[in-house]
Amino acid sequence: MNLRTPRGVKDFLPLEAEWKLELERKIRSVFHRWGYQEVISPTFEFYDLFAQGSGDQRQAYRFFDQNGDLLVLRSDLTTPIARMVATRLKDEAKPLRLGYIANVFRYDEVQVGFQREFYQAGVELLGSSSAAADAEAAALAVTIFNQVGVSGFKLDLGHTGYIQGVLSECPTQPVRERIWQLLRKKDLVGLKAAVMTGDLPEHVRVLLLNLPHARGGAKLLEEAYAGAPNEMARNAAANLREIYARLHDYGLGAQTEIDLGMVKSFGYYTGMVLEGYVPQVGFTLCSGGRYDQLGMGFGSHLPAVGFALGLERLMLALELQGLRPEAKSGGVLILPRSWPHALEYAAGMRDQGIRVEVDTENRTEAEAAAYARQRQFARVVVVDAASIRELPLDGEEGSQC
């Protein structure tokens, strides 16, 4: 018998599980205050759903059920929610604000920050194509990281329309696809070679070579608008300019930056895209953007925007910032010298929300004190028919309750 966990999955031991649940509670609280209702989708769906929605399913965990249907473990949450909105929620008033916290599965190469089963929290705002909706999603992402205590969090904003507008000036589709992939991989050497050997106008060469370095704020957007090679790129720059201005209205301008060279791995994005990070972590903590065409494969034409954050990545960022919680003393261990009285006392403590453990091993008082220190109990109480007595811990004297 192999007692190890499979590659790419992990156990959450009690303290870590408690921390994860506490972070989820804080995230749910932000969702609620911003008007987002939580939904829960199935862990597995028909393969065709994800093939239609997310496209490339080479990283999907696939299997056949007993009826011969090809199923897949969910590799993202956006696609199931698009399916849910197109069917179960199609008659609801729009826009819809939906949130989720769930595990997803991808056959990724395992490394720090990349697991094959991991947990995501995120939101989808469906039924609005406005820049205000994009700005709300971005502002909510920043707010969540601020609320859970991450310091130095930054959010980058890009736009698929700007890059597509620039690439549309390339003469052939293979050249466009090649440069897109190089930008996605951040392969600057390959990008330079492709741009310099391609049959491209000089102004397009300059724009493409500058894309990986096109980071900044309002001034960059003005320059991008003025230097846009066509209407598609110009409209994208104008859209980003409005979104960026609204984030300043939220008071979050200092935590946001424009990155015109941002390219996403998912192909369903159609407008603004976003990525969040902190300096101590070498990968993104959240990702998302606008995806107005994803629902069309399910018969829905709702524009939509959203983002997802990785819970394990969030926990790692907090840990690197010295914010991993330590075990704290708390709760009561009861030695039941009279079971009816001990259980009545335990029930009263539990009604107050206090952690209570009733000893089932007939421990001596010395053994109970040692166990309580090991398990981080704050008190040990001996309950008999006539009295309730607290045992001393850490050299303290006991007391009558």
Image (spheres, rainbow, N blue to C red):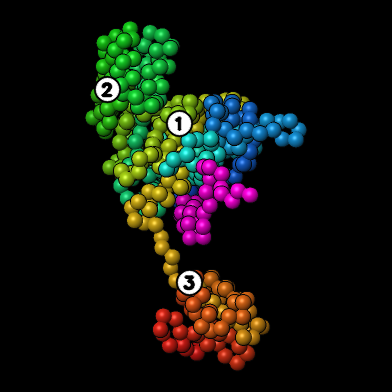
Tell me the element at label 3.
helix
Q: Position of residue 358 (x, y in %)?
A: 59, 76
Q: Nearer the viewer, mark 3 or mark 2?
A: 3
Apparent side of residue 375 relative to residue 216 in the rendered image (left or right): right
Camera-nearest residue between 239 and 103 = 103
Q: Nearer the viewer, mark 1 or mark 3?
A: 3
Q: Name the residue type under label 1.
A: Arg
Picture residue at 50% right of the left edge, 85% below the top: 390
Q: Name the residue type under label 3.
A: Gln
The residue that disc 3 covers is: 374
* Residue contact at pointers 2 and 1, CB within 8 angstroms: no
Residue 290 tag number:
1
The mark nearer the N terminus, 1 or 3, is 1
Q: Position of residue 83 (x, y in %)?
A: 60, 33
Picture residue at 34% right of the left edge, 36% below the top: 156
Q: CA distance from mark 3 to mark 2?
A: 59 Å
Q: Point out the stretch of residues depicted in magenta.
A: 1-29
Apparent side of residue 295 relative to residue 307 in the rendered image (left or right): right
Picture residue at 26% right of the left edge, 33% below the top: 217
Can residue 78 be seen by looking at this rendering? no
Q: Position of residue 280 (x, y in %)?
A: 32, 45
Picture residue at 33% right of the left edge, 7% below the top: 199
Apparent side of residue 151 relative to residue 119 in the rendered image (left or right): left
The residue that disc 2 covers is: 210
Crowding at mark 2 (Cα within 10 Å: few <14, some 14-19, many 20+)? few
Q: Is residue 290 magenta?
A: no
Tell me which corner region of the image, top left, top right, bottom left or bottom right, holds residue 70: top right
Q: Name the residue type under label 2.
A: Asn
